Every structure is written in structure tokens, then in C-alpha cells.
Amino acid sequence: MMKVANLLSNITNIFYLSLGLYRTNLNDDGCAAIAQILHMSTSITNLFLGMDSTKISSNGLSHIVSQLPYLELKEFSISCENTGVTDEGVIPLVNTISALPNLSKIGLWFSGCTGVTDRSRKKFAEMKSRGTYVEVKY
């Protein structure tokens, strides 16, 4: 993943980024590298991160979440099904994306994450009530 971050270091005007890293050895360090890419590419308006069946945890997700306020996101989707992500990662994610003013379409997929509980589900419901198109699967 660090090689990808180095490759993209000279590209500053990325508007659409889709990373399908399903069923790979992606871990929290890989999420830190993704966060570096996001840090270098603040013009991103459409972001899709597919990280199902990987080795990421809430700690890895927090690296990515830390960069979201600096992007110009209109659409955001993240799929972390069957990972180690818990409420400790999901709730800050929902709080962060709920505050993004231009976000009009959101997709969140966390099925198979046993640490995602009713605490996160309550946050999903609150986010849906704001009028933005939200698709949630847990």
C-alpha cells in the first residue's frame, strides 16, 4: 500500500477514488497509507472504499476517518463487512460524515462485524433523519 501512496504523491487533483481491497491482507497500517493518499488528494468528491474480509480494526478505520473532513466529498461509501471494526470505529465515522456539508449520498456496510451493536445502529438512524440519501447494511 505504501507503494501506491508514493505513486499517487504527485497527483493532487483526484476527484473519484475507488479502492476495492476485498479479501486481502489489508490491515491497520494499510489504512494509514490510505489516509496518506486522502491527505494528499483533498479534491476528492467521490470516495468508495471496499475493505470486506480484511484484517482492519477500528484503529485502522480511525486513520481514514481523520482525513474525511479535509475532502470535498459529495458521495462516500465504505464497506467493511466481516472485519474487526466495532462501535469504536463506526460511531466516530458517522459523527464525522454527518458533519460534511456537501455530502449527498452515503453507503455504509458493516454486516458480519460482531462489534457493531445497537449503539452504532442508533447513530445510523440519526444520520438517516437528516435528509441525505443513506444506505446502511449491518
Image (cartoon, rainbow, N blue to C red):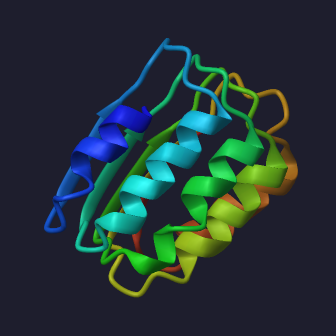
Q: Residue at (40%, 49%) from the top-left corner?
A: 77
Whole-percent x and y of residue 107?
43, 50
Front residue of this view, candidates 126 and 112: 112
| Quadrant showing the N terminus | top left
Check the image and name the residue furthest to the bottom.
Answer: 101
Q: Which residue sits at x=48%, y=69%?
A: 68
Work out whether 83 lies above or below 15.
above
Q: Along the line of sight, which residue is nearer the eye, 115 or 126?
A: 115
82 on left or right of 46: right
Q: Assign the C terminus to one quadrant of the image.
A: top right
Query: In the rendered picture of this protein, how many numbered marks are placed on residues?
Result: 0
- Residue 137 percent across, percent down from the top left: 56, 38
Q: Please identify the quarter of the rendering in which residue 47 is found.
A: bottom left
Looking at the image, residue 100 lies above or below residue 104 = below
Horizontal relation, residue 84 to residue 6: left or right? right
Can you give x and y, in whole percent of width and height, for residue 33 in the image?
Answer: 49, 45
Q: Residue shown at 44%/19% (left/top)?
A: 22
Q: In the image, is residue 27 above or below residue 28?
A: above
Instruction: Answer yes or no: is residue 121 visible.
Output: no
Residue 26 position, x and y percent, is: 55, 24
Pick the front one: 122 or 10: 10
Q: Quadrant of residue 28?
A: top right
Residue at x-position 85% and y-position 35%? 115
* Residue 105 visible somewhere in the drawing: yes
